[in-house]
Image: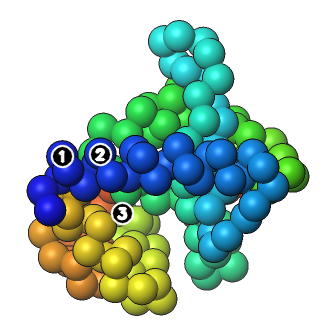
Amino acid sequence: MNADSYRRVVNIFSKVVVGLQRGGVVFGPMQLLTVKGRRSGQLRTSPIAVNELNGGRYIFQAYPKAAWVANVRAAGSVTLTRGRKSSRARLVEVPVDERGSLLRELVTTSPASVGNRFVTTGLADAPTPDGVAAAAGRIAVFRVDPA
């Protein structure tokens, strides 16, 4: 499956995840991230995974040019919703030189599909922990802090 086909499938899946989460159904690390649009000023919601690693909570960019990344960089604070519970959070972008170890840990402790996703979307050249870590300059990573 090429990156465009993959993205279309993910967009359909994302709508299903948003509907389920809004209905109170939770699964895995999925949450809804709501952030103010940097240009429109309207609230934008995207399903994302909040991963617990090394005693912290992190969100990783899975797609190139993801709008939520640019919106978070502009806004800083977001609302995270899991089922019917919401909380405000501040997302702090992890410096590029600190991302490699987090990406390596994410791929090491996750199903193989996680590493493969970075390759399918064109962010990494190899689905291995070292291959994804080598792409740290192309993958935004945010630490989730209380607002």
Going from N to C along the chain, the mark reached first, 3 or 1, is 1
- Where residue 42 sits: x, y (%)? 62, 16
Instruction: Look at the image and tell me whether residue 91 can be seen.
Output: no
**Quarter of the view holding residue 36:** top right
Q: Quadrant of the N terminus?
A: bottom left
Q: Quadrant of the C terminus?
A: top right
- Residue drawn at 45 percent across, 78 percent down: 106
How far apart marks 3 and 1 lie (CA) works out to: 30 Å
Amino acid beneath label 2: Arg
Q: Is residue 24 left or right of residue 132?
A: right
The residue lying toward the viewer, choosing from 97 and 123, is 123
Establish if 78 lies above or below 92.
Answer: above
Q: Are marks 2 and 1 in contact (CB under 8 Å)?
A: yes
- Where residue 111 sits: x, y (%)? 42, 86
Q: Are marks 3 and 2 in contact (CB under 8 Å)?
A: no
Q: Secondary structure at mark 2?
A: helix
Instruction: Look at the image and tell me whether residue 31 can be seen.
Output: yes
Q: Secondary structure at mark 1?
A: helix
Q: Secondary structure at mark 3?
A: helix
Q: Which mark is residue 4?
A: 1
Q: Nearer the viewer, mark 3 or mark 1?
A: 1
Q: Report which residue position mark 2 lands on.
A: 8
Establish if 110 lies above or below 64.
Answer: below
Q: Is residue 10 left or right of residue 76?
A: left
For label 3, count other residues whose C-alpha is less than 10 Å away and answer few (under 14), some (14-19) or many (20+): few
Q: Report which residue position mark 3 lands on.
A: 97
* Count of numbered marks: 3
